[in-house]
Image (cartoon, rainbow, N blue to C red):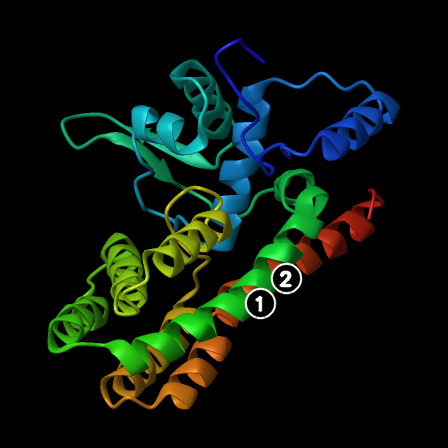
Amino acid sequence: MTAVDKPAGGAAAASDPGSSRVATAQSWAAPIVSRHVADDVVDRLVTAVALGLYVPSQQLPTERELAAMLGVSRTSVREALKQLTDTGYLEVRRGRKGGYFVLADWGPTSAEHVRRHLVAHWSEFEQIFDARTLIEPLIARTAAARRTAGDMQAIRAALQAYLDAPDHDASRRADASLHLAIAEATHNPILVTMSVDLRTRISLNLGAEPYTDEARRIAIRQHQQLVAAVAEGRADDAADIAARHFTLSENLMRDLVERAAHEDQQAGGPR
């Protein structure tokens, strides 16, 4: 990797000296593998497309935006996008509204990319799922107890934007706005920060939750139920709805891991 790049995935290094020594020992014991940062970006983006973070015909963020999201150089992003274009995942459209557009959500090498990015870090994702299961119901419960008229105005506006969203980009933005508005209704900035951080991790730092048309249909109903519970001060109901709602992304990620494992087995590859 270049001097300005950092790996495009994984948790931040632990600050505890003992943890650092363990990590160092583990790194010395691991096989020596040389990989370009662009290859890590390819793994991340193929996984993101397979999860529906970006869907066919959708335009990807710009090189500059992706570089900022992933904490890597634009050179690495540009190289990764070229690889994805050459292998048929993306297409380039020229002109004022041009850019990179998703062409395929799954390809012959998708299982390999998913295994390297998602499966290899699965223990971290299990921790994220666990934290979300604990934190998001608490946020919903607290929002139902503390919401103000101003909070409900923002929450209802975000819900309506989600219901009216004409495309995946608009749906993604409205979904983020809705859950941010509910978190802000707790009037506790620490809970807001925790919610945003968990969403960032689930979205692979790419700004969107895993998505399918069926997941959106379920989310519409759950969003309406959650907003009603918060508005009516039904704290226990709000917590229960949130607990169910935030398993949607988790289940899609688990399904993808199973799909990748199944294709690896069929191809005789590593499980």
**Where, by quadrant of the figure, is residue 149 drawn?**
bottom left
Up-down: is 30 above or below 193? above
Up-down: is 35 above or below 255? above
- Check the image and name the residue furthest to the right: 29
Residue 115 horizontal/vertical position (percent): 69, 43
**Where, by quadrant of the figure, is residue 225 drawn?**
bottom left
From where the camera sits, is residue 258 visible? Answer: yes
| Kind of residue indicated by mark 1 | Asn
Local secondary structure at mark 1: helix
Up-down: is 168 above or below 147? above
| Kind of residue indicated by mark 2 | Arg
Q: Looking at the figure, which quarter contains the N terminus? A: top right
Q: Is residue 265 left or right of residue 207?
A: right
Mark 1 closeness class: few <14, some 14–19, many ≥20 residues within 10 Å: some
Q: Which mark is residue 254?
A: 2
Residue 36 horizontal/vertical position (percent): 60, 17
- Disc 1: which residue: 251
Residue 51 horizontal/vertical position (percent): 51, 53
The residue depicted at 30 percent of the width and 56 percent of the height is 172
The residue depicted at 46 percent of the width and 22 percent of the height is 72
Q: Is residue 150 left or right of residue 260?
A: left
Residue 26 horizontal/vertical position (percent): 83, 29
From where the camera sits, is residue 217 visible? Answer: no
Asked whether disc 1 touches disc 2, contact meaning CB atoms under 8 Å apart, the reply is: yes
The residue depicted at 38 percent of the width and 83 percent of the height is 238
- Check the image and name the residue furthest to the top: 3
Q: Is residue 155 left or right of residue 143?
A: left
Residue toward you, 73 or 189: 189
The residue depicted at 13 percent of the width and 27 percent of the height is 96
Local secondary structure at mark 2: helix
